[in-house]
């Protein structure tokens, strides 16, 4: 695993969360950068696994919260993350994405 320093986001800068980087913080990733572990960024520990495709049971998002849309790609995730089973969380997201697709077709 390698360690990298992420480019500071404006939200983190506004909260002074980027100060003293990387002391006590870090990102570790595999060589393909498809599996990452963030230590003490916004969460204490964030584990991210990324892959191409539409299998929502396998992947969540591509850039994280508060990221801008790039080329019409959006990060979609559940706001509620506690008190739900994994199945319930994925089902709610799936139903929401399905509804967004239906609305897009009607537009």
Image (spheres, rainbow, N blue to C red):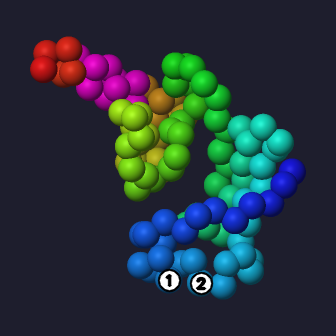
Q: How far apart are marks 2 and 1 (CA)?
A: 6 Å
Residue beneath disc 2: 19
Residue beneath disc 1: 16
Q: Can residue 99 be seen in this view?
A: no
Q: x, y (%) of residue 73?
A: 41, 34
User: Could you tell me which residue is drawn at 21 percent across and 21 percent down?
Assistant: 104
User: Could you tell me which residue is drawn at 80 percent across and 60 percent down?
Assistant: 3
Q: Magenta part of the protein: which range?
A: 92-102
Count of number-bearing discs: 2
Q: In this view, does 22 lie above or below 107?
A: below
Q: x, y (%) of residue 11?
A: 42, 69
Q: Do the residues labelled 2 and 1 touch (CB within 8 Å)?
A: yes
User: Could you tell me which residue is drawn at 66 percent across and 85 percent down?
Assistant: 20
Q: Residue 100 carries which label?
A: none
Could you tell me which secondary element the residue under label 1 belongs to? loop
Image quarter of residue 94: top left
Q: Nearer the viewer, residue 30 or 92?
A: 30
Q: x, y (%) of residue 28?
A: 78, 55
User: Could you tell me which residue is drawn at 74 percent across and 80 percent down?
Assistant: 23
């Amino acid at each position: 695993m390698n360690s990298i320093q992420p480019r500071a986001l404006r939200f983190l800068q506004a909260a002074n969360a980027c100060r003293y980087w990387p002391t006590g913080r870090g990102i570790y990733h595999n060589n393909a950068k498809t599996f990452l572990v963030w230590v003490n960024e916004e969460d204490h520990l964030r584990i991210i696994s990324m892959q191409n495709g539409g299998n929502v049971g396998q992947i969540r998002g591509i850039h994280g919260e508060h990221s801008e849309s790039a080329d019409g790609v959006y990060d979609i995730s559940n706001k509620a993350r506690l008190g739900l089973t994994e199945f319930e969380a994925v089902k709610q997201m799936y139903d929401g994405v399905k509804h967004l697709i239906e609305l897009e077709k009607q537009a």
